[in-house]
Amino acid sequence: MKTLIKNARIVNEGRTFDGSVLIDGELISKVIEGNEVPAEFEKVANVVDAKGKLLIPGVIDDQVHFREPGLTHKGEIATESVAAVAGGVTSYMEMPNTNPQTVTQELLEEKYERAAEVSPANFSFYMGATNNNLDEVLKTDGSNVCGIKIFMGSSTGNMLVDNENVLSEIFRNTKLLVATHCEDEPTIQRNIANYREKYGEFVPISAHPKIRSAEACFKSSSKAVELAAKYGTRLHVLHISTADEMKLFASGKVSEKQITAEVCVHHLWFDENDYIKKGNLIKWNPAIKSAADKAALWEALRSDRIDVVATDHAPHALQEKENTYFKAPSGGPLVQHSLVAMLEMSRKGLIAVERVIDKMCHTPADLFRIDRRGYIREGYFADLVLVDPNKKWVVSPENILYKSGWSPFDGMEFSHQITNTFVNGTQVYSDGRIISDSKGKRLKFNIQ
């Protein structure tokens, strides 16, 4: 089957231009600049008229928690991947803090098998590190696994790796990318004790960025960077949240870096003033911090100190979030709304639309060395998204597709809407609904 997407405004590789794209099977066959399309293309293809719409590569989200196995009251690979393609995310990389935790090669492969059965988006899964599974970690095949995840700070799932020898051995011996959650646990525990002494169980949510503090983040991130520099490890520090951490990272092209950084949408959108209205709904680890921190993250993103924008999509049941501070879990659902949120911030002048596509599509593909994805290029997989830039809509329970049924953006009006999503050449989503039972593919990586 061939598909012609014509009359689009293509946003790709730093440019926006009028053009069309011909899909042949799973791949992009032809990228045509200008408004003229050869007549023979229209005769042999299913035609999608994209007049008035942006055509972009599918978003690659390098950090999601889809909660399967074991935590499926919060989310499932099936439900959250549907929300992903509805949000223009065509590929995702999922985390190991499930139940059981993904800490053996057998459990890792079970996740891949499940995703192949139910996920409309392409997928990869991180191998999880613990204090006790070094041998399993070092067996991981980097050609078909995105990387190793190390929690250098405790979060949902309690996979803290705090054994210094184990950390050194992983950084010393692996050839894979190491992705880290960086918060210093002794600092956090000291802060918790101080606030618990003052407030008991009723610590206000406004204390969250003080408990999971900038100091805790910097102390852990700097340690990870030091280990990576010592051993020549490919390090990717996830969900950076503070101004102080920016000094740890260099500007430049991701292809020339061994040490890279990610920022998440919620750290760019919210700041500590939003706890008053949103409460535990925006309780994440690391915490959303000050307006000054948010401004520093934006500056670092624009100057290429930060390389990737992702979500840390981490759904919880709404009733879980309605608990007191210590009982309310950290994390929230974002994968359906990340692209439109970034495009909204582009409309406000915070970042050029071409840079949004770079940070959400191109750079993740380059950083993880993903095989033929992340760009609109001939011979690449046809992971493509059409966006109406002038179609206002309001986030509401009626259009939220997360299994948890809520979003921190509930009630927000966005000016962009995802209208069509193609995965491996097949249109899987159109105008609010899944229209194909096609399943995504396991991501492959071009390791050296």
Image (cartoon, rainbow, N blue to C red):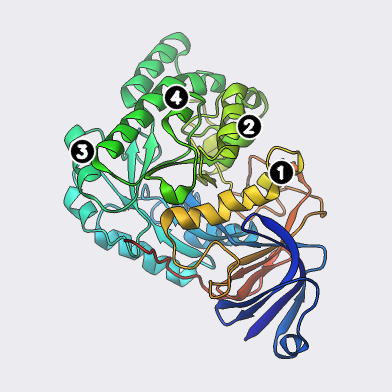
User: Mark 4 or mark 3, which has the lower sequence index?
Assistant: 3
Identify which residue, 282 or 183, lies in the foreground: 183
Q: Is mark 2 in CB contact (under 8 Å) with mark 3?
A: no
Identify which residue, 154 or 245, lies in the foreground: 245
Location of residue 158 in the rendering, given as x and y in whole percent from the top left corner: 33, 38
Residue at numbered disc 2: 270
For mark 3, give the secondary structure: helix
Above or below residue 170? Residue 208 is above
Residue at numbered disc 1: 346
User: Mark 3 or mark 1, which has the lower sequence index?
Assistant: 3
Above or below residue 144? Residue 214 is above
Residue at numbered disc 4: 212
Q: Nearer the viewer, mark 2 or mark 3?
A: 3
Location of residue 381 in the rendering, given as x and y in whole percent from the top left corner: 54, 72
Q: How many marks?
A: 4
User: Mark 4 or mark 1, which has the lower sequence index?
Assistant: 4
Gap between marks 3 and 1 measured at Cα: 40 Å
Q: Residue at x 52, y 30 (%)?
A: 323
For mark 4, give the secondary structure: loop
Q: Nearer the viewer, mark 1 or mark 2?
A: 1
Specify the quadrant of the image occupied by residue 389. Answer: bottom right
Q: Residue at x 21, y 38 (%)?
A: 168
What label sits on residue 168 in the rendered view? 3
Q: Residues within 10 Å of mark 3 (few under 14, many from 20)?
A: some
Location of residue 288 in the rendering, given as x and y in whole percent from the top left corner: 55, 29
Residue 387 visible (yes or no): yes
Identify which residue, 277 or 371, lies in the foreground: 371
Residue 403 visible (yes or no): no
Specify the quadrant of the image occupied by residue 141. Answer: bottom left
User: Mark 1 or mark 2, which has the lower sequence index?
Assistant: 2
